[in-house]
Image (spheres, rainbow, N blue to C red):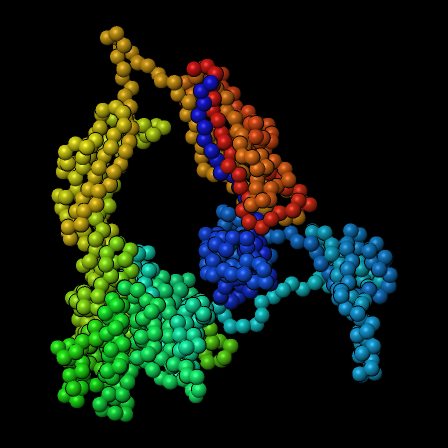
Amino acid sequence: MKRTVATLALGGFVVLAGAAAAGASELPVNLASPGLVPVTVTDPSASIGGVKPARSGLVEGRVVAHYDKQALIRAGALGPATTQLVASDGSVEPVAPNVTLEVKVTGSKSKVRSVAGAGVLEPLVPDVDLDKLAAKARARTGRVIPDMAAWQTLTLPAGTDADAAIKDLLASGQVSDAYVAPEAAPPPQTQPTPDFTAMQGYLRPAPQGIDADFTRKDPRIRGAGVTIADLEYYWTANHEDLQLDPIATDLGKTTYPQYPNFADEHGTAVFGEMVAKDNGYGVTGGVPDATMRGISPQRARPTGSPQYNTAAALTYVAQFLSPGDVVLIEQQTVGPGGGTKYVPIEWTQANFDAIKLLSDMKVIVMETGGNGGEDLDSAPMLGRFDRTVRDSGAIIGGAGSATTHAALNFSSYGKRVDLQGWGESITTTGSGGNLFGGTAPEMLTRRYTRSFSGTSGAGPIVTSAIAAVQSYLKATGQTPYTSAQMIDLLRRTGTAQTGTRQVGPLPNLAAALKDIEVDGPVTKASLSPAPVEGWYLNPTITLSADDGWGVGVKDGTLEYRLDGGDWKPYTAPFSVLTPNAHTLETRATDLKGNTATRTTTFNVYDLDTPVDGAAGGSVPATLALTLGGAASFGAFVPGVDRVYSASTTANVISSAGDALLTVSDPSAVSPGRLVNGTFALNEPVQATAKAGTYAAVTGAGLSLLTYAGPISNDSVAIGFRQHIGAGDALRTGAYGKTLTFTLSTTTP
């Protein structure tokens, strides 16, 4: 017997809108607010509608995963209300729940049951000794409390006319009050957080911003693989747009405890510029995939209050970092001018030594310039900011205008200031909530500002550019840059400043990354006409090359070679006429000299086979079966007796004298029945072909079609039915089964 086999994925799912597909939420989900949805799951990494959990952990012995609510809604896994099911095709079906009434019984409960028919009557207030409670009330007040024992919950079957049932109950004389039981409603709160990303001009393309819009499109340039450690007094780790682990994020913990007395939202604003989640609301950081860490400059002491010790904190944090990581110093110190004439903290020698230690460990230090408006080249600075005198290796950042990129008057400036970021009009998380959230304590995790500023605001912008470059270098197998290399790259490719006070150029990530790109152009080979069962007849091959976000393909460099032959320049489409298997290699070079080779394999067949010199041809033995897309039943609704339908198609080619199309389930687990983990549906799936008779799929196989002779490109409509009874238990999640279709013959 000859045969050909194809497999088909068949499935359906149960989605509780307002709970989630991977399990049941412990409480009703409040769709009116942003944030995370807690879901009880069996797999800590389980995705819902393609959305991965933000974090997972054990809660009272249960595995609970937290999912971003807005992402679930965008993925279609949560509907706009808890009374909707969302199907795989995006359609929304209303749930048919039981009808629940709250009734106050004044007569016989048996009479109420008789009037209600199939209703189930249960106490509204179970598990409370109401007589004892009433006695306490009488002792304390001398009054008789309401009789809560008279209140009952009456559950009626789905589809019951609630108004008619209430009317009958009130008319019976056994019930004094009756109404539909209220549903859970969201708690009162402010509106969902809007999307403020359009206001983040510092991330727009040059010359306005650093062009993080460009880098966030490539997963290799979003900061992955790079840790940013911020020397910062305090931050709100659980801000809705940061969602950081408070324990892992705080490197200092009790050794360097956070200090909230200096504008506790300062750190939240700095973090948001760099790593705010890319989630469709609030803001998005310049490198949202970077690992964010913080350390306080306040060192705990055995006795007395913590001591401000930046040198110690910088040395302490060095033990957690690797080459290519970045330390952002969000601190300043009083310079020789005294008062508020702040300068970079390396003014003091201990800080300088600690920064140089980090630099020598190949960690890039981004040091904010300070808001004292000081000239770092002036004589009172004693040459401490002159690289020919001493060089800590840090990148010092100044604050520039959001529009002209000239130095703002409060920013330190001079030859030692390498790069600038916006020092004004920065939209980010936290910092007083003057854009959204306000100052109310309960809004701490939902505050956004439109006016963060200073060298404090400029530093994270430059740090985002540094982390983006380092993440690309790491992702492409290159050695991370040193500070000197990074300064050279970002200054050469940046947007020039204006004005006479040097604060350096604004980084331009698109230009910088094109300067260091190592990706060769991607070549593509298109073959036509379309293949038959993976074989081409005298195909014509067209080549193309694309350099993606790189500098472009160099003219005349697109080449190819066939089956290990000589490389040839590609000038026009060409044909391959020789039968059998072939290997095609293609390559092209970009304007930076990067080359990439791609290999494509294909098969060629020849229909013309001469026999004894006479005209003729031969037909090879052919059994070909091609299935259409996976079949889905959509959403299964618990508690409802229903037959679900699904369909797919098959294309049959047979040169045999007879052929048989069958479907089977060879799996050892619940053959013929859709499964969800260790759970299986009660009844097997049924199948038919060409609107024939439905029958159950078994492990042994079900015959669908019989062919009495050769057939070519027969389009077969295949249908499936799945019955689920009202009493069948359904487990939340996806049900599925892989079925095997076989086209076989006993007559060659």
Quadrant in the rendering for residue 490:
bottom left
Can residue 524 be seen here? Answer: yes
Query: Which percent across, then down, holds residue 200?
Result: 33, 69
Residue that appears at 60% across and 44% down: 679
Between 63 and 747, the residue placed more toward the observer is 63
Q: Is residue 516 left or right of residue 727?
A: left
Q: Residue at x 37, y 72 (%)?
A: 294
Whole-percent x, y for residue 400 in the image: 24, 77
Q: In the image shown, does 287 or 297 lie closer to the viewer?
A: 297
Residue occupying the point 18% across, 44% down: 588
Give the answer, above or below, for where 523 lies relative to 214.
above
Q: Is residue 748 above or below residue 95?
A: above
Give how far across and how far down residue 277 sits, in percent.
40, 64
Residue at image coords 43%, 88%: 304
- Number of marks present in the image shown: 0
Q: Is residue 209 left or right of residue 101?
A: left
Residue placed most toward the observer, 471 or 169: 471
User: From the viewer's perspective, is 61 left or right of 131?
Assistant: left
Place of residue 61 in the rendered image (x, y in percent of width and height, measured from the top left) = 58, 60
Would you say residue 17 is visible in this rendering? no
Q: Quadrant of residue 293?
A: bottom left
